[in-house]
Image (spheres, coloured by chain):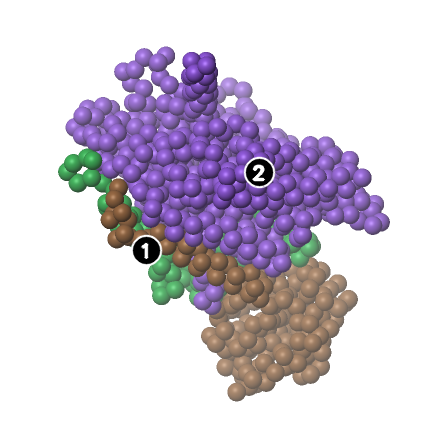
Chain colours: A green, B brown, C purple
C-alpha cells in the first residue's frame, strides 16, 4: 500500500515537470528486442537499475519518460552486443552506485555481505549450550 | 539451567541494546542531515564524452562535443520547452550571456515548433543547440533531470554541475565556477 | 461540535492511560487492593474512549466537515462514500489515531478476558501497555492533532490520492495496523514478565493467542498489500523490497519466529529468555518500521516530507520504549534461565533452527533497508535492491523451509532421522523430479531451488496428518499443517512466476492481434468512459487461450482523475487455474497505435492463495487454542466451586 502511495506522490511531484512533453517515447522504451535472449538479458539488467526521477522504482517498473529513455539506451546497447555488466558499470561511472540496485562489494559495502556470516556465528555462540550433548537433561 | 550457563555469554544480553543505540544514532543523522534529494553526476573532473547532436532549431547551429574545446570555459545547459523551471531560469541564462558566457544548449525530448514558441516568450541565450530526443546526453554526462547546467573548461573537461534552475542569487556562483575553470 | 467531542474523548483516554500506569505501577510495589482493582476497568474504559475518538473522526470524514483541517486536506465532497470513510485513516494523523485506538482496545480486551497469569504479572503487563499508549497519546495531542480546526472553513477539500481510491486499499492499512499494534500486547506481556521474573509455560500459553491474532492480520495485510501493488502499479511486479514493504515484512518475520518459540516455551518450558526477547523485538519492529516510513528518512525521494519535529518525537518514543525494554532485558534476562535442554534432532531443535533462520532473515532485511542511510552517513550513496535481498534471503529461507518438511514429524526432546526417513521418500522424489525439470528447462538457480523445495513441501507439509483419523486431529494441528502447506503453495507461485513469466510490449492498432505465451490477444476497441471523479480511455481486449472457444474479455483503462489531477493505468486481469493474463493500456503511439503491455504469469495467483492459506491456518490454530483455554477455564471454575462447597 505504502509503495503505491509513494509511487503516487512521485507521480504528483514529477507531474508538472513532464506535463507538456509531447514527444513519443524513445523507440525501445516500450518495445522489446526481437531476439528473446537479448531481451531477457536487457530485462534482467533493467530490473536492477534505479529510475533517476521516481527513484523508488526500477526503470522496468516506471512510466517516467527518463526511465523510458534509459530502457531505450539499455536495449540498444544490448542489441549492439554489449555486456549487461559493462552497461551497469558505464552507468555507475556516471551516476555513482546509486543507480544500481545491485551493490558491489567494496570498502563501503562489505558489511552488507559480512552480515549473514556474522548472524550465523552469533547464533552458534548463543545456541551452542542450548543443545544437550549426548544426553538429554 | 544453572547460573553458570548464562555467565559466559552475558555480553550477548547487552547486544540488542547496543545495536539499537547504533540504530538511534544513525536515524538521528538521517533526521537532521540536509535534505539532499538530488543525484549528483560522477563525471566531474572527467572529459566530456563524445557526442554529435543534430540542430534543434533552424536558426542555431548543431552541437557536438568538440565545440567545447579551445577558448574560454563554456556552460552546457540541459533544458526543455516543456519544463517550467527552465522558463524560470531563462533570465539568469540571459544575464550570464550578457556577462560574456558562451552557453550551449541541449534540448531534451523537444520539437522545433515548441522551442520557437519558448524562445519567443523567454529569449534565446544559446549560441548552439543540440536536440536529444532519447536523453542520451543526459546519461552520458550523468544528468538526471532538467534543467541542469555543466561548466566545461577549454580542454573539454567537466568541472562543475548545477542541478535545477539557476536562481538569480546563484549567477555569481556560476560566474565564479567559470572563472575557476579557466585555470 | 463532533470534532470537539472527539478531542475531549482523546484527552480523557490519555488521562485514563496515565491513571492505569500509576495504579498498576504502585500496586506492584505495595499490596494495595483498591488501586490494583482499578487497573482492569480503567484499561477497558481507556480503550473504549479511544474508539469513541476514532469514531468521531470517521463521522467527520463521512460528513466532509471542512472546518476540520485534516478533512480539508485529505477529502473531497465528490468522493465516493467508501473512500470518504477510508480517508479517515489514509493520512498521518488519522492513522496514528487508529494506532492508539487498536492499542487501547487490545489492552482493554486483555484486561477483560485474561485470567491465567499471576496477578502481579498481569498488573505489570497492563501498566506497560498504558506506558506505551501514553507516548502515542502525547504524540497525537501535541504534534499531530487529528481534530485541528480551520477558521474559516474552506469551500472544498483537496481530495484523496487516486491510487488510494481502491476498495482493497481502503481496508489494507487497518489490517496491517491491527497486526502491528496487536504485537504491542506481546511486548507488554514480555515486559511484565521481565518485571516480575515470571517466565513460564503459563506465560507462553497466555501470550500465544495474542501473537497468533496479530500474526494473522499481518499475514493477511502483507498478502493483500502485495496483491494491490501487483494490479495497481501496472507492471506485473508483486514485491519490490521497497523500504515501505520491508517495514511490514520485518514485524512479520519477528512475529513468525515468536509464534514458533512461544510454542516451545508452552510445551517444553525451554527458550525462555529468547521468547521474551522476541516478544520485545516483534513490536519494536512494528514501531521501527512505522517510524522509518513516517519520518521519510529512508524512502529517500518524493516520499513523505521529512518533518524533524514529528520525526524526533517518534524517535524519542522509540528510544524510551525499545531502549527501555532492551535495557530491562539486559539486566533481568540473566536471571531468567533458559529452561529444559534438548537434542539437535528433536522438535525443539527444528524450531530453534527455524528461529535462527527467521532472525537472520530479519537481520538481512533490516541491514539492507538501513544500509543506504548508513552509506549516506559515510558520504556516499548506494542502492540495495532485489539483487541483494533475493539471494541473501534465500540463503536462510530455503534451508529453513527444508527443515520445515521434517520438523513437524519429529518428537519433542530427542528423535532419530532414521525413524521418519521412510516417510520422506515421496516428497524427496517429487523434489528431485522438479529439480530435474527445472535444470532441463534452464531456468535461474533461485527459481529452480524454489520450485524444487515447493514440490517436496506440497506433500511433506501434509505428512503430519498421514495415518491419523482426521476427525481426531486437533484444530491447532490442522492450523499448522494448513499454514505450512500455504507456505509451500506461495513458494511455488513465486518460483513459477519468476521462472516462467512471459512479457509482451506492443503498439497495436484496433483490430490487431498480439500473442503472449499461449494467449492471442486482440485489441477490440478504445472508448472513452467516465467514473464518479475520473474520465478514462478504456481498451477492450479479447483474449483466447490456445484453441479454446470463446475469448475472455478484458477492459483496461488509462484514467485521468481531477481531484487531485493525476493519471493512472488500470490493469485488467484474467485468471485461469494455471495462471493470470495481465494487460495494461498505455499511451497513444504514432499511426493510431496504442501501447499495450501484456504478461502471461503462470501460477502467479498461488502466491496470494498461499498467503490466505497461511492466514487461515493461523485462524484455525487460534480457534483451537481459545477453545481449549475456555474449556480449561470452565474446568478450573468447577473445581473451585466444588472446593468451596466442600469447605463449607
- Residue C351, labelled with which disc? none
Chain ID at mark 2: C
Side (left or right) of C552 relative to C261: right
Res A78 → quadrant = bottom left
Work out whether residue C539 can be spotted: no
Q: Residue at x 66, y 71 (%)?
A: B166
Q: Quadrant of residue B86?
A: bottom right
Residue where numbered disc 1 is placed: B11
Identity of the residue drawn at 40% across and 49% down: C329
**Observer-nearest of B25 and B64:** B25
Residue plotted at (63% across, 50% down)? C139
What residue did someone put label 2 on?
C35
Q: Secondary structure at mark 2?
A: helix
Can marks 2 and 1 be said to lie on one chain? no
**In the drawing, does residue B90 fall left or right of residue C441?**
right
For the C terminus of chain A, give its image quadrant.
top left
**How far across and how far down the image is residue C182, in percent?**
52, 36
Amino acid at each position: 500500500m505504502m509503495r503505491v502511495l509513494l509511487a503516487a506522490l512521485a507521480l504528483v511531484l514529477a507531474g508538472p515537470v513532464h506535463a507538456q512533453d509531447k514527444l513519443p517515447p524513445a523507440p525501445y522504451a516500450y518495445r522489446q528486442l526481437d531476439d528473446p535472449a537479448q531481451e531477457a538479458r536487457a530485462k534482467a539488467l533493467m530490473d536492477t537499475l534505479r529510475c533517476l526521477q521516481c527513484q523508488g522504482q526500477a526503470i522496468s517498473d516506471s512510466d517516467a519518460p527518463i526511465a523510458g529513455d534509459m530502457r531505450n539506451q539499455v536495449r540498444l546497447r544490448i542489441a549492439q552486443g554489449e555486456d549487461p555488466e559493462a552497461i551497469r558499470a558505464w552507468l555507475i561511472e556516471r551516476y555513482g552506485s546509486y543507480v544500481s540496485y545491485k551493490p558491489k562489494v567494496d570498502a563501503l559495502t562489505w558489511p552488507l555481505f559480512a552480515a549473514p556470516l556474522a548472524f550465523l556465528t552469533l547464533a552458534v555462540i548463543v545456541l551452542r549450550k542450548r543443545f544437550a550433548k549426548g544426553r538429554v537433561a | 539451567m544453572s547460573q553458570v550457563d548464562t555467565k559466559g555469554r552475558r555480553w550477548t544480553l547487552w547486544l540488542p541494546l547496543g545495536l539499537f543505540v547504533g540504530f538511534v544514532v544513525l536515524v538521528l543523522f538521517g533526521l537532521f542531515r540536509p535534505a539532499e534529494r538530488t543525484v549528483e553526476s560522477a563525471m566531474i573532473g572527467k572529459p566530456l564524452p563524445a557526442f554529435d547532436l543534430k540542430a534543434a532549431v533552424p536558426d542555431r547551429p548543431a552541437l557536438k562535443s568538440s565545440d567545447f574545446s579551445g577558448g574560454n570555459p563554456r556552460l552546457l545547459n540541459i533544458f526543455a520547452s516543456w519544463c517550467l523551471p527552465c522558463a524560470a531560469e531563462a533570465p539568469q541564462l540571459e544575464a550570464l550571456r550578457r556577462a560574456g558566457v558562451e552557453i550551449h544548449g541541449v534540448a531534451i525530448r523537444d520539437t522545433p515548433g515548441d522551442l520557437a514558441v519558448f524562445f519567443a516568450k523567454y529569449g534565446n541565450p544559446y549560441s548552439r543547440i543540440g536536440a536529444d530526443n532519447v536523453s542520451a546526453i543526459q546519461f552520458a554526462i550523468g544528468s538526471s533531470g532538467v534543467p541542469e547546467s555543466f561548466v566545461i573548461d577549454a580542454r573539454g573537461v567537466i568541472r562543475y554541475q548545477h542541478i535545477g534552475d539557476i536562481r538569480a542569487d546563484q549567477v555569481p556562483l556560476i560566474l565564479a565556477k567559470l572563472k575557476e575553470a579557466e585555470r | 461540535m463532533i470534532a470537539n467531542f472527539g478531542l475531549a474523548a482523546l484527552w480523557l483516554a490519555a488521562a485514563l492511560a496515565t491513571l492505569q500506569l500509576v495504579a498498576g505501577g504502585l500496586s506492584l510495589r505495595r499490596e494495595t487492593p483498591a488501586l490494583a482493582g482499578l487497573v482492569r476497568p480503567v484499561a477497558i474504559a481507556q480503550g473504549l474512549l479511544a474508539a469513541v475518538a476514532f469514531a468521531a473522526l470517521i463521522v467527520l470524514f463521512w460528513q466532509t466537515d471542512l472546518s476540520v483541517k485534516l478533512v480539508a486536506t485529505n477529502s473531497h465532497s465528490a468522493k465516493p462514500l467508501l473512500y470518504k470513510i477510508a480517508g479517515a485513516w489514509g493520512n498521518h494523523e488519522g492513522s496514528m489515531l487508529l494506532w492508539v485506538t487498536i492499542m487501547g482496545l487490545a489492552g482493554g480486551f486483555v484486561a477483560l478476558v485474561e485470567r491465567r497469569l499471576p496477578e502481579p504479572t498481569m498488573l505489570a503487563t497492563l501498566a506497560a501497555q498504558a506506558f506505551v499508549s501514553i507516548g502515542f497519546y502525547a504524540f497525537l495531542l501535541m504534534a499531530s492533532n487529528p481534530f485541528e480546526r480551520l477558521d474559516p472553513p474552506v469551500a472544498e477539500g483537496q481530495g484523496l490520492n487516486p491510487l488510494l481510491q481502491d476498495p482493497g486499499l481502503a481496508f489494507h492499512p487497518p489490517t496491517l495496523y491491527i497486526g502491528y499494534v496487536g504485537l504491542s500486547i506481546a511486548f507488554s506481556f514480555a515486559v511484565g514478565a521481565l518485571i516480575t521474573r515470571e517466565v513460564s509455560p503459563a506465560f507462553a500459553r497466555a501470550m500465544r493467542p495474542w501473537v497468533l491474532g496479530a500474526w494473522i492480520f499481518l499475514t493477511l495485510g502483507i498478502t493483500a498489500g502485495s496483491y494491490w501493488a501487483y494490479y495497481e502499479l501496472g507492471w506485473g511486479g508483486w514485491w519490490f523490497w521497497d523500504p515501505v514493504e520491508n517495514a511490514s515484512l520485518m514485524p512479520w518475520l519477528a512475529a513468525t519466529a515468536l509464534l514458533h518459540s512461544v510454542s516451545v516455551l508452552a510445551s517444553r518450558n525451554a527458550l525462555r529468555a529468547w521468547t521474551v526477547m522476541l516478544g520485545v523485538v516483534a513490536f519494536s519492529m512494528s514501531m521501527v518500521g512505522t517510524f522509518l516510513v513516517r519520518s521519510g528518512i529512508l524512502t529517500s525521494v518524493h516520499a513523505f516530507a521529512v518533518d524533524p519535529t514529528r520525526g524526533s518525537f517518534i524517535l524519542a518514543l522509540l528510544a524510551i520504549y525499545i531502549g527501555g525494554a532492551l535495557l530491562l532485558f539486559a539486566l533481568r534476562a540473566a536471571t531468567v534461565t533458559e529452561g529444559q535442554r534438548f537434542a539437535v534432532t528433536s522438535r525443539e531443535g527444528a524450531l530453534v533452527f527455524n528461529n535462527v533462520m527467521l532472525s537472520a532473515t530479519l537481520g538481512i532485511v533490516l541491514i539492507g533497508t538501513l544500509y543506504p542511510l548508513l552509506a549516506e552517513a559515510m558520504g556516499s550513496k548506494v542502492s540495495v535492491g532485489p539483487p541483494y535481498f533475493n539471494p541473501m534471503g534465500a540463503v536462510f529461507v530455503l534451508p529453513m523451509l527444508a527443515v520445515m518438511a521434517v520438523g513437524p514429524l519429529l518428537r519433542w526432546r530427542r528423535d532419530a532421522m532414521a525413524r521418519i526417513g521412510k516417510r520422506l521418500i515421496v516428497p524427496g522424489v517429487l523434489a528431485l523430479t522438479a529439480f530435474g525439470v527445472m535444470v532441463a528447462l534452464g531456468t535461474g538457480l533461485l527459481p529452480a531451488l524454489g520450485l524444487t523445495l515447493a514440490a517436496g513441501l506440497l506433500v511433506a507439509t501434509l505428512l503430519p496428518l498421514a495415518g491419523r483419523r482426521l476427525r481426531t486431529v486437533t484444530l491447532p494441528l490442522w492450523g499448522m499443517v494448513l499454514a505450512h502447506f500455504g507456505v509451500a503453495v506461495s513458494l511455488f507461485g513465486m518460483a513459477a512466476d519468476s521462472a516462467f513469466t512471459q512479457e509482451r510490449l506492443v503498439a497495436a492498432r484496433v483490430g490487431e492481434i498480439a500473442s503472449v505465451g499461449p494467449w492471442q490477444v486482440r485489441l477490440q476497441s478504445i472508448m472513452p468512459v467516465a467514473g464518479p471523479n475520473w474520465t478514462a480511455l478504456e481498451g477492450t481486449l479479447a483474449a483466447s487461450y490456445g484453441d479454446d472457444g470463446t475469448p475472455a474479455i478484458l477492459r483496461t483503462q488509462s484514467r485521468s482523475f481531477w481531484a487531485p489531477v493525476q493519471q493512472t493505468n488500470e490493469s485488467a486481469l484474467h485468471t485461469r487455474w494455471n495462471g493470470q493474463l495481465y494487460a495494461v493500456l498505455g499511451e497513444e503511439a504514432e499511426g493510431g497505435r496504442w501501447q499495450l503491455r501484456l504478461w502471461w504469469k503462470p501460477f502467479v495467483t498461488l502466491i496470494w492463495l498461499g498467503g490466505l492459506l497461511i492466514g487461515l491456518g493461523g485462524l484455525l490454530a487460534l480457534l483451537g487454542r481459545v477453545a481449549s483455554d475456555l474449556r480449561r477455564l470452565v474446568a478450573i471454575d468447577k473445581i473451585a466451586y466444588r472446593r468451596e462447597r466442600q469447605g463449607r
